Image: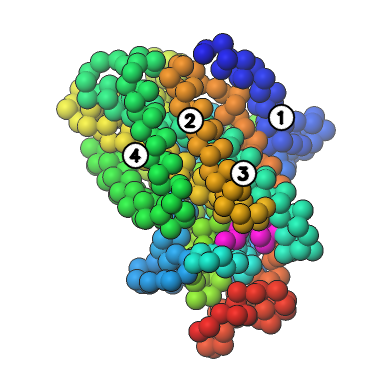
Amino acid sequence: MKAIFEAVNNVFSFIGPVSDFLWDFPTNFEWYAKIPILGNLSLAIILLVGSGLYFSFRLGFVQVTHFKKGIKTLVNKKTTKTGISPLAAFFLSTAMRVGPGNIIGVTGAIAVGGPGALFWMWVSAFFGMATAYMEGTLAQIFKEKKEDEFVGGLPFYGRKLLGNKIWIGVFLSVLYILYALCCLPAQGFNVVSSVGRIAEVLTGSTIKSDAVFYYVVGAIVVIMTAFIAFGGIKKVTKWTDKMVPVMAVVYVLTVLALIVINVTRIPFFFSAVFGGAFTPEAVFGGAFGTVLAQGVKRGLMSNEAGQGTITMPAAAADAEHPCEQGIVSSLGVFLDTIVICTLTGFVVVMAHGWIGAGGEAFRALDKFPMFTESVAILTPGTALNATMSILVSLCFCLFAYTCLLGMISFSEIVANRISTSKLCISTVRIICLFVAAFGILCNIAGLELGNLWAFSDLGNILIVYFNIPIVYVGSKYVFRATKHYKKNDGSPFNSKVIGREDCTYWDERKE
């Protein structure tokens, strides 16, 4: 079995360099890299942060002015006959946003770029909230009704905005499905490996990767996923409605407990983060590019603002106005990065395991072991160590599993842009399950297919390069919809509000 996996790993050995080239372009050209400060900024960073800045100003910083209104939208109980509630859509999108990247992404960013990378995560997330608002609103404007569900997202608004050509919708659907397939092996791997970690802590012994235990756990994960995924998006949301609040609350309380135990280290955290982001050496030296790139790159990996990959649940919601769900989408970025990622940053930075005699060995660890080692540093020689290790491993497991469910569910939604037939939808589900199972088998084989996992970074940047230009094409419609929403004169939203004639659902909607 190992020979097969190693062969697959070798086949995809070119993916990492291609992904790095696209993320770093054009800083990988000497003439550009020599430009002061600008030479440290890649096109991806300029596109993501620049777009967030532009949309923030054009929208009047809606992520701030309507933050409270977004919270009210979430807490208001709403029953729907078609689609899902805004809160259910928020949980579904959070299931995808709050994934393993919130732990291993942040840990990796700090390991490579230093604590200052966390500051640039905050910056990119704040402006990314405006980009997420744009995406969520577009998804609502151009959503379509399918029986008792709504379908929409990037392939749907992309097709409408680019001449309503069938091939565009199909291409964007295939692009997302390929992106999900690239990420699913890692999620399957993460779920099973984290369950193994919990079992090892509980038993106090090491479990071999090819033990019967992992086969049993892997089979249970695949069966549970099939049971949930084949029930459709409404069944998926019933599960994410339960799992997302639990994993978020457990993670927040666990890290807050670590912070309280190590309260004297809090000043070090802030000095390290702001010092790493603003020292003259960081701003004017080559280190600035590394810190900024890691902050933005891993921030995107976590909250996905600008990718269009979280637009499917936004479209699935039964909202009163398209902008209502746009605000909810921006809140998802806030929870993901400003809250969850910051808590991860507290653990890694306060532990500062890279400093001192053991620093080299610490940096050599893989990302999740590096995080659990940070937890151990913050609870040295105490009974809390095992408890905290179990809790963070449980959260990591839930982060990965809800992300897995989200990717399969979103792939099903975008598949409707290719064909609404049950055969097409079921085929997509089966392929996704098979690929997730492949990731689980990688764990059993004792392999971490780094080259195959590099697909997720490649998928991230490719979708950004397609999605952001489409969002600009549709920006005038979002600006008009926002103006109508802020006016709040009681008039219904329809095609005429934005100067189009093809917002079918909103034109036919009965108040």
> Which range is magenta?
151-158
Q: CA distance from mark 2 to mark 4?
A: 21 Å
Q: Earlier in the sequence, mark 1 or mark 2?
A: 1
Q: Amino acid at mark 1?
A: Val
Q: Amino acid at mark 2?
A: Ala
Eyeballing the image, is 476 above or below 4? below
Please tell me whether mark 1 sits on a helix, a strand or a loop: helix
Crowding at dot 3, Cα within 10 Å, few <14 / some 14-19 / many 20+, comes out as many
Please tell me whether mark 3 sits on a helix, a strand or a loop: helix
Q: Which residue is mark 3?
A: 177
Q: Which residue is mark 1?
A: 18
Q: Earlier in the sequence, mark 3 or mark 1?
A: 1
Q: Earlier in the sequence, mark 2 or mark 3?
A: 3
Please tell me whether mark 2 sits on a helix, a strand or a loop: helix
Q: CA distance from mark 4 to mark 1?
A: 32 Å
Q: Quadrant of residue 449?
A: top right
Residue 157 in magenta stretch: yes
- Dominant SS of magenta comes to helix
Q: Earlier in the sequence, mark 4 or mark 3?
A: 3
Labels 4, 3: front one:
3
Are dots 2 and 3 in contact, CB under 8 Å? no
Q: Earlier in the sequence, mark 2 or mark 4?
A: 4
Are dots 1 and 2 in contact, CB under 8 Å? no
Q: Amino acid at mark 4?
A: Cys
- Give me the disc on residue 437: 2
Q: Which residue is mark 4?
A: 395
Q: Is residue 468 left or right of residue 264?
A: right
Q: Is residue 201 left or right of residue 137?
A: left
Pinpoint residue 322: horizontal percent, then vertical percent: 56, 71
Are dots 3 and 1 in contact, CB under 8 Å? no
Labels 2, 4: front one:
2
The residue shown at (48%, 30%) is 437
